[in-house]
Image (cartoon, rainbow, N blue to C red):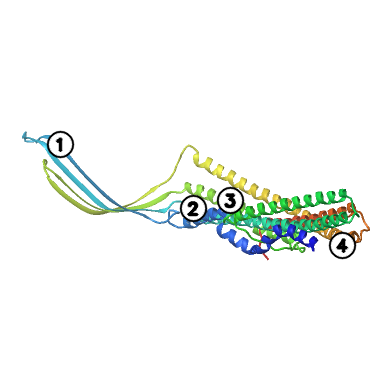
Amino acid sequence: MKRLIIIVCFITPFYGLAQSEPELRLDEAIAIALENNYDIRLVAKDVAIATNNVHIGNAGMLPVVSGDVSAAAGIQNTTQTLLSGETRALRGARNRSMAYGASLDWTIFDGLQMFTRYEQLKELKALGEANLKAAILATVYEVVSGYFDLVQQQQLIDATQTALELSAFRYQTAENRYQIGRASKLEVLAASVDLNTDTTNLLRQHDLYRRSQVRLNELLARDVNTDFGVVDTIVIANDLHYETLFQLAKQLNPTLQSAIVNHRVSQLELKRIKGERYPVVAISSAYTRSQSSTQLGFSTRSRNNGFNYGISASMNIFNGFMQRRNEQNAEFAMEAAEIEVDKINKNIEAQLLAAYQTYLMNLELVRLEERNRDIANENMDITLEKFKLGSIAPLEFREAQRNFVDASTRYSTAQYQAKLAEITLNQIAGALKVE
């Protein structure tokens, strides 16, 4: 009974709170991140601006209508000499004038530049959407990797907790044997040192778990003090194929999509600049009402109203060869964008191949470490029974205990690394999602 009380005293401070924590599922964590994450919200605002900019008026296809009002007044000293020789003079003569009306200006042809600008606005919207997808994928990757890091940390806590229970049992056994004279004080002290070591390890493991919790809460953009639990297993997909992922990456990878959109934007920019070679035709019209008054002159008051309209055309004939240089620069930019697409294609292919090799290697490590863990568990069970019978030395028991903890740690780490390789492959392919 005394032995049981000691074990419970060591277990309760570390295990009681963990059982009361509400469990956070992975899909819930991702949903919270997609709603709250600051990076996603900022990029989403850029997309909203780009979407709002896709309008024919922003491309210059619609007329500009403006209303104009003007008023002026003045005080002048005036002397006038008429043809008859008569002289008129007036000091402090007041003059007033006012005009108001509406005008319309509309470019009806500019070498199709307005249509090209409209297509550019559409492509800039697509670019914003690709950037948003990249931000979402990056955030989901961080959330998933952070979540499974917590799962790994929890598994390590469980292994360390088991080691602590075994050390507590060993200490109590040594204490009992010492009391009846069948063990030396040295054996009790050695068991006490190992028990304190395992207690320290558990405290440190809990601290690592709590720090990982804080980092995940920060990613979810919520109170960093929020306490929660996670699932206790890591499920790894073992059916990923390189060719399938490579085809998905060509279609869905947001970095590649951004480069392709930038290439289309550069093509449209070249087309727009070439449109500057054509004439620009515009129409204009205005309706104006005006009135004025003066205290000296042939006419002391006048009023006017009327409608006027016109059409104009202009064409660049020579501007210091700037047109040709602008076209050459646009061609260079288009070629650079094409090179960037090829570069990113190769980069994605290399990243995907390297990640896939890592994924296969980690799958094999998981299988190997799982066998090692099972062997270490069986060895620990056998060693524990022998220790209870007093047929093995405490040092052998401690060695089996260390092997058990090390095997459990390597297995958890192998699982986590394999999961990271899996989500890295899906991120590169642009298909990262929650099953």
- The quarter of the image holding the C terminus is bottom right
First reached walking from the N terminus: tag 1 or tag 2: 1
Q: Residues within 10 Å of mark 1 (few under 14, many from 20)?
A: few
The mark found on residue 117 in the picture is 2
Q: From the top left corner, tell me how far across and down residue 104 is, in percent.
A: 33, 54
Alpha-carbon span between mark 4 and mark 1: 114 Å
Residue drawn at 86 percent across, 53 percent down: 398
Q: Is residue 423 visible?
A: no
First reached walking from the N terminus: tag 2 or tag 4: 2
Query: In this orientation, which residue lies closer to the viewer: 397 or 122?
Result: 397
Q: Do the residues labelled 3 and 2 touch (CB within 8 Å)?
A: no
First reached walking from the N terminus: tag 1 or tag 3: 1
- The quarter of the image holding the N terminus is bottom right
19 vs 358: above or below:
below
Q: How many labels does the image show?
A: 4
Q: What element carries label 2?
A: helix
The residue pinned by badge 4 equals 381
Residue 229: quadrant of the picture: bottom right
Q: What residue type is labelled 4?
A: Asp
The residue pinned by badge 3 equals 262
Alpha-carbon span between mark 1 and mark 3: 63 Å
Q: How crowded is mark 2: few (under 14 residues within 10 Å), some or many (20 or more)?
A: many
Residue drawn at 64 percent across, 47 percent down: 340
Alpha-carbon span between mark 3 and mark 2: 14 Å
Q: From the top left corner, tell me how far across and down residue 353 is, in percent.
A: 75, 53
Q: What residue type is labelled 3?
A: Asn
Q: From the top left corner, tell me how far across and down residue 425 is, in percent.
A: 71, 57
The residue pinned by badge 1 equals 76
